[in-house]
Image (cartoon, grey):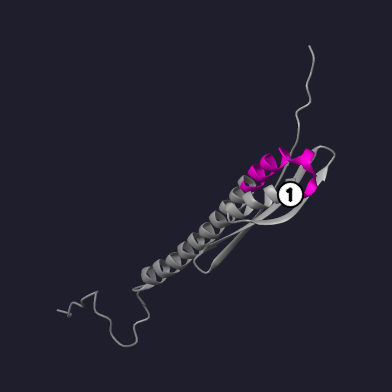
């Protein structure tokens, strides 16, 4: 009677190579991809946060400065600068066009080693009255 060979045991010269360890390699590759996607999501979140904060700072600065437009561009822009800095943003430009105040603001957010930058702009002035 011939000897029965254990199918789990490999002998030298066997061409049937098992796939042991392939799942580990695929799992490691999947982890790297997931970490890269998570990093990208954090960066995107930082950019969106910076853009929203810049827009809020620009809106507030334009509204506050527009109340002082009749006192001159200097007074209106000084008030806008105060509110921009109170929101921890940077004023890019401030100008009076007619009776409107146009404000451009930038804001930077740090998310660990990543940096997100956003800009906002706003225009405020008197509302035109409409009659009937």
| 67 falls in the magenta region | yes
Q: Which residue is mark 1?
A: 77
Q: From where the camera sits, is residue 120 visible?
A: no
| 60 falls in the magenta region | yes
Query: What is the x, y in percent for residue 127?
Result: 75, 28
The stretch in magenta equals 57-74
Residue 7 appears in which quarter of the rendering?
bottom left
Pick out the residue farthest to the top.
Answer: 132
Q: Residue at x 66, y 45 (%)?
A: 61
Query: What is the x, y in percent for residue 11?
Result: 28, 85
Q: Residues within 10 Å of mark 1 (few under 14, many from 20)?
A: many
Relative to 90, residue 61 above or below: above
Pick out the residue farthest to the left.
Answer: 1
Query: What is the x, y in percent for residue 14?
Result: 34, 82
Relative to 83, residue 117 above or below: below
Q: Quadrant of the N terminus?
A: bottom left
């Amino acid at each position: 009677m011939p000897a029965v060979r254990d199918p789990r045991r490999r002998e030298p010269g066997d061409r049937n190579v098992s796939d042991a360890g392939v799942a580990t390699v695929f799992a490691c590759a999947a982890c790297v991809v997931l970490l890269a996607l998570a990093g990208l999501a954090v960066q995107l979140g930082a950019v969106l946060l910076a853009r929203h904060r810049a827009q809020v700072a620009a809106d507030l600065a334009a509204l506050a400065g527009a109340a002082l437009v009749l006192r001159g561009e200097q007074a209106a822009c000084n008030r806008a600068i105060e509110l921009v800095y109170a929101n921890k943003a940077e004023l890019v430009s401030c100008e009076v066009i007619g009776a409107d105040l146009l404000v451009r603001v930038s804001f930077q957010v740090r998310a660990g080693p990543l940096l997100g930058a956003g800009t906002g702009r706003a225009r405020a002035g008197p509302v035109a009255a409409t009659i009937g």
